[in-house]
Image: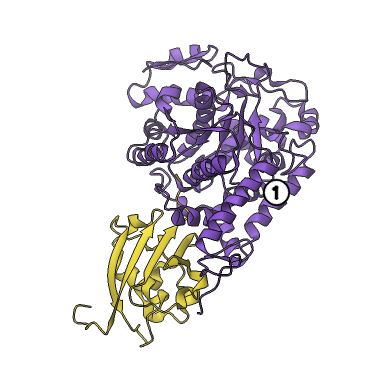
C-alpha cells in the first residue's frame, strides 16, 4: 500500500485513520484535532467556569489518564482558569488497585496535580475483597459501582470540590444507550446521555460546609472514541495502567460492549450515531431533564447513581453489569424520575407495591426479593419525586435509605455468617431504624461529615 | 526456526500493551524472527504473524482473548480465508510502525525487516 498523506497538513505520512469520518491524519495533526474537539465539547457545553476547582476521577486507566492530560493541556492553552486535582478511589482489591494507584501517583507528579486517594474501607468499612468474600464473585460489581459513585462525590466534598469529571467516552455512552434501550428504560437513557449531571441538595449548603449532595459531574470525553483515546495515549506516550478487574474475568465478553464494537467494525460512525440517537430519544422522554440534548450546559441533569458496575470501565462486564442493571432496576425511584413518574405513580398508587414496580414487570421477582432490605413505608409520596437525603448517611437519595446504605445493610447483616450464625441476629434488627449500622465486627457511622 | 538462515527469517519487534501483555508472559516487547514465507510460500503477512504468535509466543491458554476463533490458531492450515476466519478480538488495535494497520492493508500487510508491530487492547478498564 502506498503511504497515505495526512489530510490536514498534506505533508506528513498519515498514521491514524479516524473512526468517525475515515480521515487520515499524521500524528501531530491527530493530537491537535483530538484536543481541539475536546475543547469544543467543553466550550459548547460550558462545562467549566473560571475559578472552578475540578476533581478528575482518576483510575490510572487510559480514559482518566487521557482526560487528566488533555484537561491540563487545554487549561493551559486556552486559559480556562480552572484548578485541576486528581481523585482516586481505592476499592480495596489486592493486586489490582495497587498497581493502578501507583500509576495515578506518577500521573500526579507528571501533571503537577494534587492527588487524593480514598478507600472503600474508610468510607464504608468494607474493602471489595471483603465484599467478595461475603457475596461471592457474582454480582459484586453492583456493590463496587454503587460505592464508587458515592465515593467520588464524597471525596469531592471532602476536598471542597463541586465538580467531578470522569473519563466516560463515546463507546461507554453508546453502550449505555444500547443497554437502556434493551431494557426499555428511557428515563435512565435520558439521564445517562447527558454530558453534565448533578446531584443537587434539597437544602442549599452554606458556603462553609460543603455538602456532598451537590456535586456536578461531567464527561468531557463523551464524544471521543475509545480508539482515539488509546491512540492519543499511545502517541503522547502517556503513562497508564491496564488491567482486568480480578473480579470480572469475563469482562472481555461484555455483551453490549461487544455489540458496540461489532457495530463499529461494520460502520465506524455507528458509535457516535448511537450516542446522538440516545440524545435525541432522551429529548422525547416526557419531562426528561435533558431537553436541551447535548446543548445548554447551564442545565444539569439530576442524577442519582446512574452508572452501575465498574465506574470507569462502565459496562465492561457481563455478569457484573447485568447484575448491577438489575440492582439499578431495584432502585425504583431512579426509573421513575421526572414527568414519567407522574403517570406511573398515579397508575400504581392503589397498589401496595412500590410505585414503579409496573415499569419493568419482567424483573418484579428479583425486585421483590431485593426490596426486602430497605424500609420503604414512607414512599407513598406525591407523584413528583423529591430528592432528599439518605436517612443514614445524608447522601442524595430519593428514597429514605440510599443505595449504598441498603447494600451495606445487607452486607453487615450477613457478615457474621462467616463466623457465627446466631449471635448477631438480634442487633441487626435493632439497626434497621437507626442511623448507625451495627454489625458484629464493627460499628459504622455514615454521617455526612 | 533455529535452522533457518538469515534470508529465511524476518527480524521484527512485536509489542503488546493495554493489558494484552498479560497474555504474553507479561512482557511488553518481544524481539522475534519469523519465517519470511508463510505455509503457502507467500510473503509472511500480519495474518501469518497472528497465527505465529498464537502458536509460539502465547503461553496463556486464553487464545480467544487475542483471536476471535481460538481453534483457528491451532489448525492454521484449515484457514481458507484468513480475513474471515482469523480475527482478532474486536477492540484490539494493531499499529504497524505506529500507523493504524487499516492504513497498511490490515492483515494482508507483508511484514518487512525491522517492522514494529504493536497490539493494543482498548477494552481494559482502569
> Would you identify the image quadrant in which residue A195 lies?
top right
Q: Residues within 10 Å of mark 1 (few under 14, many from 20)?
A: many
In-image side of A123 versus A191 (left or right)? left
Q: Give the colour in which the image draws chain B.
A: yellow
**Label tally:** 1
Nearer to us in this view, A353 or B79: B79
Q: Position of residue B83 (x, y in %)?
A: 49, 76
Nearer to us in this view, B10 or A432: B10
Label 1 secondary element: helix
**Label 1: chain letter:** A
Which residue has dot 1 on it? A278
Whether residue A197 is visible: yes
State whether residue A299 is above or below residue A435: below
Nearer to us in this view, B55 or A423: B55
Whether residue A176 is visible: no
Q: Position of residue A33 (x, y in %)?
A: 59, 56
Q: Residue at x 38, y 25 (%)?
A: A417
Q: Residue furthest left?
A: B3
Q: Residue at x 55, y 69 (%)?
A: A11
State whether residue A283 is above or below residue A92: below
Q: Residue at x 64, y 23 (%)?
A: A399
> Would you identify the image quadrant in which residue A100 lies?
top left
Q: Give the colour in which the image draws chain A.
A: purple
Q: Position of residue A282 (x, y in %)?
A: 74, 44
Q: Position of residue A35 (x, y in %)?
A: 57, 50
State whether residue A384 is above or below residue A240: above
Amino acid at each position: 500500500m502506498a503511504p497515505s498523506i495526512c489530510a490536514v497538513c498534506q505533508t506528513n505520512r498519515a498514521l491514524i485513520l479516524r473512526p468517525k469520518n475515515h480521515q487520515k491524519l499524521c500524528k501531530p495533526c491527530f493530537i491537535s484535532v483530538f484536543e481541539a474537539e475536546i475543547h469544543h465539547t467543553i466550550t459548547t457545553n460550558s462545562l467549566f467556569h473560571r475559578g472552578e476547582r475540578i476533581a478528575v476521577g482518576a483510575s490510572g486507566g487510559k480514559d482518566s489518564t487521557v482526560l487528566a492530560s488533555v484537561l491540563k493541556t487545554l487549561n493551559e492553552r486556552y486559559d480556562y482558569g480552572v484548578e485541576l486535582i486528581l481523585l482516586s478511589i481505592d476499592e480495596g482489591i489486592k493486586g489490582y488497585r495497587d498497581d493502578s494507584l501507583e500509576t495515578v501517583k506518577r500521573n500526579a507528579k507528571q501533571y503537577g496535580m494534587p492527588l487524593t486517594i480514598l478507600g472503600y474501607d474508610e468510607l464504608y468499612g468494607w474493602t471489595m475483597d471483603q465484599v467478595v468474600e461475603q457475596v461471592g464473585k457474582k454480582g459484586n460489581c453492583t456493590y463496587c459501582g454503587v460505592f464508587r459513585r458515592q465515593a467520588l462525590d464524597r471525596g469531592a466534598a471532602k476536598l471542597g470540590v463541586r465538580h467531578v469529571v470522569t473519563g466516560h467516552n463515546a463507546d461507554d455512552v453508546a453502550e449505555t444507550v444500547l443497554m437502556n434501550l434493551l431494557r426499555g428504560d428511557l428515563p435512565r437513557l435520558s439521564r445517562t446521555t447527558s454530558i453534565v449531571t448533578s446531584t443537587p441538595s434539597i437544602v442549599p449548603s452554606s458556603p462553609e460546609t460543603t455538602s456532598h449532595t451537590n456535586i456536578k459531574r461531567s464527561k468531557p470525553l463523551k464524544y471521543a472514541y475509545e480508539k482515539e483515546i488509546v491512540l492519543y495515549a499511545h502517541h503522547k506516550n502517556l503513562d497508564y495502567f491496564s488491567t482486568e478487574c480480578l473480579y470480572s474475568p469475563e469482562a472481555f465478553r461484555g455483551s453490549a460492549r461487544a455489540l458496540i464494537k461489532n457495530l463499529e467494525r461494520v460502520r465506524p460512525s455507528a458509535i457516535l450515531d448511537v450516542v446522538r440517537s440516545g440524545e435525541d430519544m432522551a429529548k422525547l422522554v416526557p419531562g426528561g431533564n435533558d431537553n436541551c440534548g447535548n446543548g445548554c450546559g447551564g442545565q444539569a441533569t439530576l442524577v442519582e447513581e446512574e452508572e452501575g458496575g465498574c465506574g470507569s470501565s462502565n459496562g465492561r462486564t457481563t455478569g457484573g453489569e447485568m447484575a448491577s442493571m438489575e440492582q439499578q432496576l431495584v432502585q425504583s425511584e431512579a426509573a421513575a424520575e421526572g414527568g414519567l413518574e407522574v403517570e406511573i405513580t398515579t397508575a400504581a398508587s392503589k397498589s401496595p407495591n412500590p410505585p414503579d414496580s409496573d415499569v419493568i414487570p419482567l424483573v418484579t421477582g428479583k425486585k421483590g426479593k431485593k426490596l426486602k432490605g430497605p424500609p420503604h413505608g414512607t414512599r407513598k409520596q406525591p407523584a413528583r419525586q423529591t430528592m432528599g437525603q439518605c436517612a443514614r448517611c445524608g447522601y442524595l437519595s430519593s428514597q429514605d435509605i440510599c443505595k449504598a446504605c441498603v447494600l451495606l445493610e445487607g452486607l453487615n447483616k450477613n457478615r457474621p455468617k462467616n463466623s457465627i450464625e446466631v449471635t448477631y441476629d438480634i442487633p441487626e434488627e435493632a439497626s434497621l431504624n437507626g442511623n448507625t449500622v451495627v454489625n458484629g465486627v464493627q460499628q459504622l457511622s455514615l454521617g455526612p461529615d | 526456526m533455529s535452522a533457518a538462515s538469515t534470508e529465511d527469517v524476518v527480524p521484527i519487534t512485536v509489542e503488546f500493551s493495554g493489558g494484552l501483555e498479560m497474555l504474553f508472559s507479561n512482557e511488553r516487547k518481544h524481539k522475534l524472527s519469523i519465517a519470511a514465507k508463510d505455509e503457502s510460500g507467500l510473503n509472511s503477512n500480519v495474518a501469518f504473524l497472528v497465527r505465529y504468535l498464537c502458536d509460539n509466543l502465547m503461553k496463556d491458554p486464553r487464545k480467544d482473548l487475542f483471536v476471535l476463533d481460538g481453534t483457528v490458531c491451532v489448525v492454521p492450515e484449515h484457514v481458507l480465508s484468513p480475513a474471515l476466519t482469523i480475527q482478532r478480538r474486536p477492540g484490539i488495535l494493531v499499529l504497524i510502525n505506529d500507523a493504524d494497520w487499516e492504513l497498511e492493508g490490515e492483515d494482508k500487510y507483508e511484514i518487512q525487516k525491522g517492522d514494529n508491530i504493536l497490539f493494543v487492547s482498548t477494552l481494559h478498564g482502569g
